[in-house]
Image: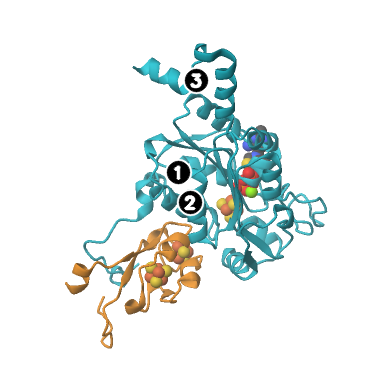
Amino acid sequence: MVQAAEQTKKPKGSVIITAERCKGCGFCVEFCPPEVLELSAEYNSKGYHPPILAKRDQCTGCDICGMVCPDFAIYGYMIKKSNKEA
Amino acid sequence: MPEELYDVESNVPANPIEDLLRMDRIPHIWCPGCGIGTTVNCFVRALQTSGLDLDKVSVVSGIGCTGRVAGYMRLDSFHTTHGRAIPFATGLKLANPELKVIVYSGDGDLTAIGGNHFIHAARRNMDITVILINNMIYGMTGGQVAPTTPVGATASTTPHGNFEETFNLPFLAESCGAVYVARWTAHHVRHLTKSIKEAVAKKGFSFVEILAPCPTLFSRRNKLGDGLDQMEYYRDSSEIKNGADTKSVALDFQGKIIVGKFVDKVRPTYIEAMNNHYKAKYGDRYVPSDEMRKLNHA
Ligand SMILES: Cc1ncc(C[n+]2csc(CCOP(=O)(O)OP(=O)(O)O)c2C)c(N)n1
Ligand code: SF4
Ligand code: SF4
Ligand code: SF4
Ligand SMILES: [Mg+2]
């Protein structure tokens, strides 16, 4: 995915989403502290709308989304310095 | 799903749950918005940072939606009969005191059909951890009333509302002698993870009650919306009161929820009391079961 053009600072964290496992409960979107997730308009094969990282530069990698997700469909991680600079 | 919605970067850590869950059984059976999976996330993260030797941890469940947890854990685990997780766990612990035995089961399983086992394991200060998922009903069998159903809530067997007094589980556990008692909700993921870590590190009977949404049978019948609505209720109506008098933490229907660590004390565990007693009575003729095991395996 193309990074937003206006993005200046490097993000601290990111998420991995296993879209097929998602059941669209919305917990991750609601409880992400910086509110960087959104349910996508797309469907997975079970008919649910999985989340997407809408504000990529603001994810802190705190993994609250990973802890609240009842379906193990998302988790957050901190981007290591070396990854960031790459 | 179009792949391009998701970047797959290199060098990212794997999902932390993959270590400890039987991934071939995922997706699990729980409904969308069911809180049981959320509690499992916290449990897994707690175990991973607990410093315990995970080869010596076993998870025991009874029957119910929550009872499925044992079957999803990639640990020694036992899915026992309804209400009998605690006696099974007790047997495991007595036969091999080196094990950390954790019971993970539902409110109906542990406090209705299994209620006496709960009372007596706490009384004996049996060296096990009990994690109880309180969704306020029997989920798996269709939303029947449970000892934990709040007065005024509707269940499939109380279509005109429940009028029976509700168990206040932290008070019950403390009165019976539990040495660690805490309550959290599925919304309190960080506190809950820390609390599970403390509970499994504790010697004796430790008890963690977790309120979790059952959108399919509790919320829907009570017109409370979905799992997210219940999680928002937990967020908006909980108050953290560590050390609160457990008499004061009873739950009512959609009322205020007192959460926190209520009890953290020390008293001899069942195994310590038994060993001390028989050592005093029989001296060297008494060999405790953990020493016996070592002799047998030597
Ligand atoms: C001896 C026996 N009686 C009744 C049942 C039916 N039964 C299965 S699960 C269950 C209740 C489970 O409720 P709870 O422990 O609260 O778990 P939940 O599904 O809510 O997580 C009952 C009554 C059974 N399996 N065995
Ligand atoms: S890791 Fe934290 S900041 Fe990033 S999406 Fe998840 S909850 Fe939000
Ligand atoms: S919490 Fe999990 S299941 Fe719920 S919407 Fe987010 S990714 Fe999907
Ligand atoms: S019936 Fe209730 S407790 Fe059982 S999986 Fe569905 S939401 Fe969860
Ligand atoms: Mg239940």
Q: Are marks 2 and 1 in contact (CB under 8 Å)?
A: yes
Q: Kindly identify which residue carries mark 3.
A: B288
Report helix, strand or loop for mark 2.
Answer: helix
Position in image of residue B223 (x %, y %)? 70, 66
Label for residue B40? 2
Quadrant (top left, top right, bottom left, bottom right) of the N terminus of chain B:
bottom left
Name which residue lies at 71% across and 45% down: B172
Amino acid type at mark 1: Tyr
Amino acid type at mark 3: Pro
Task: Judge depth for marks 2 and 1 and give the one in front.
Answer: 2
Q: Which residue is more in the foreground, A27 or A85?
A: A85
The CA distance from mark 3 to mark 2 is: 34 Å
Question: Is residue B140 visible to the viewer in this orientation of the structure?
Answer: no
**Which chain is represented by orange in the image?**
A
**Which chain is represented by cyan in the image?**
B
Position in image of residue B99 (x %, y %)? 45, 32
Position in image of residue B28 (x %, y %)? 47, 50
Q: Kindly identify which residue carries mark 1.
A: B72
The CA distance from mark 3 to mark 1 is: 33 Å
Question: Is residue B222 visible to the viewer in this orientation of the structure?
Answer: yes
Report helix, strand or loop for mark 1.
Answer: helix
Report helix, strand or loop for mark 3.
Answer: loop
Label located before the other in sequence (3 or 2):
2
Name the image colouring. Answer: by chain
Residue furthest toward the top? B285
Name which residue lies at 34% across and 56% down: B15
Label located before the other in sequence (2 or 1):
2
Amino acid type at mark 2: Val
* Left or right: B198 as drawn, with respect to A56: right
* Left or right: A28 as drawn, with respect to A79: right
Label for residue B293? none
Q: Are marks 3 and 2 on the same chain?
A: yes
